[in-house]
Amino acid sequence: MTKMLMTLLLTFCFAHPVFAHGNPAHESLDLSNAWARKTGRRSVSAAVYFDIHNQTHAQETLTAVSSDRAAIAMIHRSFEQDDIMRMEMQDEVPIAPAEKLSFEPGSYHVMLIDLTEPLVEGDVFPVTLSFKNAGDVTIYVEVTGISGPQN
């Protein structure tokens, strides 16, 4: 019962934008659709995906990430080069005014390394995003099945 209530409460949080700073009616950083795939018992890493919409009039920059669910959290970008998929750590990610940026498979993502426990489908956990202007903003990540969110 407690897990169900917590899931409902956190699901409600997903339905509303996170106003990171300023007047929500005029300037906001909208963070939504946070998810991660479930992991196996022996998995030591996982990727987190979400959308950012910079509704401010200034460039914003994602500078760091953290989560209690892993010893290390990093910003990564996956890309194809010479027909090979590669992944690079990113020191920061700029988000232009009015830009919508998706952290998604095959692109930007938060890499969680040395998980404290497996990610179980239906669980919800926090990840803190650190922005140059907005400061620290916590999002709640829903753990999905292996194929990702089902709309």
Image (tube, helix red, strand yellow):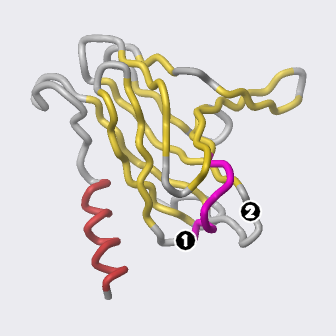
Depth check, front residue: 55 or 134: 134
Furthest toward the front, the residue is 71
Q: Is residue 55 left or right of residue 51?
A: left
Question: Mark on residue 43?
Answer: 2
The amino acid at mark 2 is Ser
Residue beneath the point at 42% across and 19% down: 61
Q: Position of residue 139 (x, y in %)?
A: 37, 47
Residue beneath the point at 41% across and 43% down: 128
Q: Earlier in the sequence, mark 1 or mark 2?
A: 2
Q: Residues within 10 Å of mark 1 (few under 14, many from 20)?
A: some
Furthest toward the top, the residue is 58
Query: Helix or strand or loop: what does disc 2 sit on?
Result: loop
Q: Is residue 118 above or below residue 71?
A: below
Asked where in the image residue 40 lies, by quadrant, the reply is bottom right
Q: Is residue 103 above or below residue 54?
A: below
Q: Is residue 118 magenta?
A: yes
Q: Is residue 75 magenta?
A: no
The amino acid at mark 1 is Glu
Q: Is residue 46 above or below residue 134?
A: below
Residue beneath the point at 53% across and 21% down: 92
Asked where in the image residue 117 lies, by quadrant, the reply is bottom right
Q: Magenta span covers which residues?
A: 112-120
Q: CA distance from mark 1 to mark 2?
A: 14 Å
Q: Is residue 149 left or right of residue 135?
A: right
Residue position for label 1: 121
